[in-house]
Image: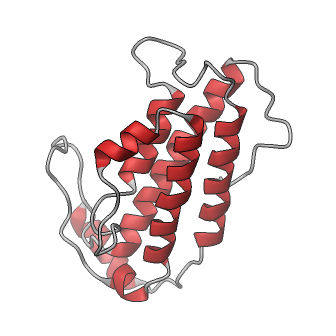
Amino acid sequence: MRAIAAEAHNDQEYPRLNFAPYWRMTNDNLIELIDLVPEGKLDWSPAPTEWSIRVIVTHIILARYHHPIVPPEGGPQVQDVVMDCRTKEGLKKHIRSSWGMVAAFLSDPEKLDAVHEPLTGGLAPEYVEPEVYDGHYITYHRMAHDLHHRSTIIGYLNQLGISMDGRRIRPL
């Protein structure tokens, strides 16, 4: 599989895509979705084995703090983020601040083009890292992660009977 991926990568040149404004729109929509969560439902989930909205949003935030997106001066301490994320205001604060960090990474061509060491610790053996683990892949992976969990939050809000009329943006 890697040989096919490498061959496809080497055979074609692809134009750079400017998806940052759309990802920012999705980030703003995450904040809007948090605002829709009724008081007392932040820790609700449809089943005991599923993550709550609060846990999902905290997970999105913490996933953005992986190397190499974290700036050289470092991000906030994980325990501080987790403590702040107990409230809707804390979640929104960290969605905004973590987006600022991601946006800075996205706007730095050197960081995007740099090849990084994959963070393979803890991954199940069925996960395969790409042939080239560069900043483009890292940001693609983070954006896909955000979109994946955003859809779960939308599903939860629907199950809670919260209208999404006029609030469901179409990133995909």
Q: Is residue 120 left or right of residue 61?
A: left
Residue 110 location in percent, x, y?
A: 36, 88
Residue at image point 76% right, 25% down: 162
Residue at image point 19% right, 58% down: 119
Relative to 10, say whether 24 is above or below: above
Relative to 123, say whether 49 is above or below: above
Residue 155 location in percent, x, y?
A: 63, 28
Between 79 and 9, which is closer to the camera in this rendering? Answer: 79
| Location of residue 67 by image quarter | bottom left
Residue at image point 58% right, 47% down: 92
Q: Is residue 39 left or right of residue 147?
A: right
Between 158 and 172, which is closer to the camera in this rendering? Answer: 158
Residue 54 location in percent, x, y?
A: 50, 31
Residue 166 location in percent, x, y?
A: 85, 43
| The N terminus - image quarter | bottom left
Relative to 34, say whether 11 is above or below: below
Colour pattern of the rendering: secondary structure
Residue at the outermost top position: 48
Residue at the outermost right position: 166
Q: How many marks?
A: 0
